[in-house]
Amino acid sequence: MPRNALYATIVLVLAVAAAVVSFVEGNWLGVVWVLMAGVASNIAWYYLRKDRAARAARAAQPQA
């Protein structure tokens, strides 16, 4: 797993936990945490797909 994807996944988990805590306490600030979790999820997905495409491109190149 690429390092950026790992960091984004950690941020995702922390943002979801913060959203749950905020909503349990009755604080509507949890909406911001949910939005942050969505952005972090997209970033993680982007870097995972980018790494997968790079590996496929390297595998498709002929060996010299």
Image (cartoon, rainbow, N blue to C red):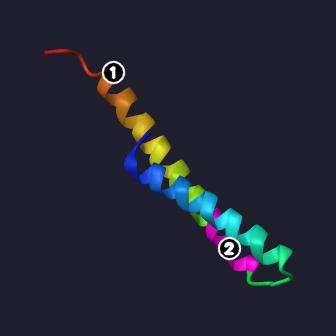
Question: Label 1 crowding class (10 Å Cα cut-off): few <14, some 14-19, many 20+?
Answer: few
Q: Secondary structure at mark 2?
A: helix
Q: Amino acid at mark 1?
A: Ala
| Image position, residue 42 (x, y; %) | 58, 57
Count of number-bearing discs: 2
| Labelled disc at residue 33 | 2
The answer to whether residue 46 is above or below residue 17 is: above
Name which quarter of the figure residue 13 lies in.
bottom right
Is 6 or 38 nearer to us in this picture?
Answer: 6
Is 5 situated left or right of 58 in this image?
right
Tell me where the magenta segment starts and ends, as one range. Answer: 30-38
Residue placed at 75% from the left, 77% from the top? 30
Residue name at image x 42 percent, y 36 percent = 53
| Label 1: which secondary element | helix
55 or 14, nearer to the observer: 14
The residue that disc 1 covers is 60
